[in-house]
Amino acid sequence: MASPDSKVSLTSKLGLRPLTTQNILFHYAPAQGILSYTALSVNVMNPSLVLRIFPKRDITNILLFNSLVGSGLYLYNRPHLAALPTREKLLFSSFGAVTFSLGSVLIWAIIRSVVPQNVALCTVCGIGSGLALIKIGKSYTETVDSLVSKKL
């Protein structure tokens, strides 16, 4: 039988946190935003695939909305915005989320226009570029956070 410590380490290894308001808003919502963002990349790069999965409903706006909420909450909670008034934090995190998400959609549309119309290739390009953009964005915000913390 597993010890309680092994359960904690397994849940922490999986990135699971207790269900608190703070964790729901600033851990689980951004994680769900990453999933929606990745699905959005597939949707933009390969709309026929998504239409086969959801034939009666266009889920583009749902995926975009979830991506915006997830990335906006991620930015809102970053240390470099911590000292700002709530109004400015909302403004800057919303601007960052919209710029990131819609900029990504534009990038995917451009990639889609130059990549051969191959279902597998378009899907891989969409997911790969989406994950790369997420990694770059995360590195960028961590760098900004570290620069701000050095000044304090």
Image (cartoon, rainbow, N blue to C red):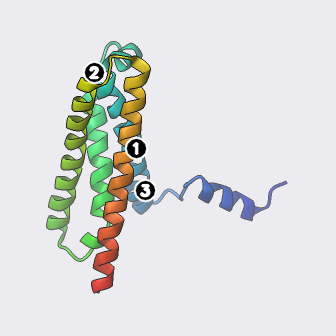
Question: Whole-percent x and y of residue 136?
Answer: 35, 54
Spatial distance from mark 1 to mark 2, Cα to Cα? Answer: 23 Å
Q: Secondary structure at mark 3?
A: helix
Earlier-in-chain disc, 1 versus 2: 2
Residue under the image location 16 percent in, 54 percent down: 95
Q: Secondary structure at mark 1?
A: helix
- Disc 3 crowd rating (10 Å Cα; few below 14, some 14-19, many 20+) is many
Identify the residue position indicated by label 2 in the image.
Answer: 58
Rendered position, 109 above or below 65: above
Earlier-in-chain disc, 1 versus 3: 3
Q: Which amino acid, mark 3?
A: His
Q: To which quarter of the image does residue 39 belong?
A: top left
Residue under the image location 42 percent in, 54 percent down: 24
Q: To which quarter of the image does residue 140 belong?
A: bottom left
Identify the residue position indicated by label 3 in the image.
Answer: 27
Residue under the image location 30 percent in, 18 percent down: 57
Spatial distance from mark 1 to mark 3, Cα to Cα? Answer: 18 Å
Rendered position, 92 above or below 68: below
Residue under the image location 23 percent in, 77 percent down: 83
Identify the residue position indicated by label 1 in the image.
Answer: 131
Nearer the observer, 13 or 28: 13
Q: Secondary structure at mark 2?
A: loop
Nearer the observer, 1 or 117: 117
Question: Whole-percent x and y of residue 148?
Answer: 28, 78
Label total for image: 3
Q: Which amino acid, mark 1?
A: Leu
- Disc 1 crowd rating (10 Å Cα; few below 14, some 14-19, many 20+) is some
Residue furthest bottom as drawn: 152
